[in-house]
Image (spheres, helix red, strand yellow):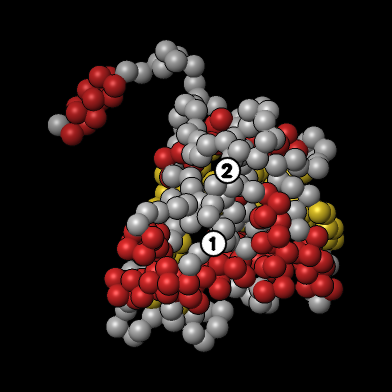
Amino acid sequence: MATGLAAATARRHLLHLPRHRWAYLSSSAATTEGLDGGDGSGGGRVKIFDRDLKRRHRDRAAWAMGETDALADAVADNLLDRLEDCRKAFPSALCLGGSAGAVRRSLRGRGGIEKLIMMDMSADMVRKWQEMENATDDGLETHFVVGDEEYLPMKESSQDTIISCLGLHWTNDLPGAMIQCRLALKPDGLFLAAILGGETLKELRIACTIAQMEREGGISPRMSPLAQVRDAGNLLTRAGFTLPGVDVDRYTVKYNSALELVEHLRAMGETNALFQRNPILKKDTALATAAIYQSMFGLEDGTVPATFQVIYMTGWKEHPSQQKAKRRGSATLSFSDLQKQFGSNQN
């Protein structure tokens, strides 16, 4: 059964569906979506997203966002729950971009964090967080840094935990960004991340595709490629983390219209930043998308639902104290012996 959460406004409602948990231990390489963006940078690096455009999106979001956001707060709260599952404390923490403001609001002393560094690629967003911090008085030592997740400006082995909430899915080299996070962690340090998964905004994808086919006779990339659940565990092992864990949550947010959904995405800084995007969206295509969305997915109360799939990833930097798998062939008891033992007990 879905559990209701308080909405950011009276018109918006968020439903949290049950969590499904998987643990991935595969060491195969993670898949990578996208082609070279053709920006002339060369170097053989995959360029999917325009990071400069994404920075401008973050600048705009700094002025458009409200004091709270029900979706971001719910994701951040669930992400930080993992700190309470750990017996150790994490005195120093680095929080990366995305919904770092929601992480700061939801921290509430969890994890034994004494020093927090909040980092974003947008100077405007960092100033927004500083203004919010001035109104907070909980004794937490907080520092602010303008920096890019793709070029992490942190010393090696300097942080006890690194937290990223709804930000890393905009990096062009996600495994590379995660490797940099691992290097910045102290031994036995914890990496926590939440990224949007492939089922996110599936209703909008369908409506936009149909509208473009009807009005323009073809489709152009309007929404970014997102990681699939099956890839998340591979990303962690590829980045060198030990004891990897992956969780998946699905949230359903109800809006008055598809246009209100788009405004919420803008306020979150989650609009299209693809290199191979079409910068022009015709008015009739946009209106057709909203109409199709309403007709296909509209609810009885007149609202429209939007699905957000969130993939939570947990990994640790290697340390001798961590549990390890036994060497292959080192078992002293066979399954046949176990079967005989339990079989005899039943008799």
Q: Is residue 113 visible?
A: no
Look at mark 1 in the image and give the residue it sits on.
280
- Which residue is at a point 38% across and 80% down the rendered structure image? 303
Answer above or below: position of 27 versus 109: above
Q: How crowded is mark 1: few (under 14 residues within 10 Å), some or many (20 or more)?
A: few
Looking at the picture, how far across and down is residue 197, in whole percent?
47, 51
Looking at the picture, how far across and down is residue 159, in whole percent?
77, 43
The amino acid on which the numbered mark 2 sits, given as a three-letter code, is: Ile
Look at mark 2 in the image and give the residue it sits on.
48
Gap in Å between the C-alphas at discs 1 and 2? 18 Å
Q: Is residue 179 left or right of residue 156?
A: left
Between disc 1 and disc 2, whose residue precedes?
2
- Which residue is at a point 78% across and 69% down the rendered structure image? 128
- Which residue is at a point 44% across and 44% down the rendered structure image? 228
Q: In this view, does 126 lie to the left or right of 262?
A: right
Q: Nearer the viewer, residue 165 or 140?
A: 165
Outermost left residue: 347
Indicate the quadrant containing the N terminus: top left, top right, bottom left or bottom right: bottom left
Looking at the picture, how far across and down is residue 60, in whole percent?
70, 67
Answer above or below: position of 3 versus 197: below
Q: Nearer the viewer, residue 310 or 339?
A: 310
Looking at the picture, how far across and down is residue 278, in whole percent?
53, 55
The amino acid on which the numbered mark 1 sits, given as a three-letter code, is: Ile
Q: In this view, does 203 lie to the left or right of 119?
A: left
Viewer-side label of 1, 2 = 1
Q: Which of 51 and 28 is in front in this view?
A: 51
Numbered circles on residues, count: 2
The reply to whether discs 1 and 2 touch (Cβ–Cβ < 8 Å) is: no
Which secondary structure lies at badge 1?
Answer: loop
Q: Residues within 10 Å of mark 2 (few under 14, many from 20)?
A: many
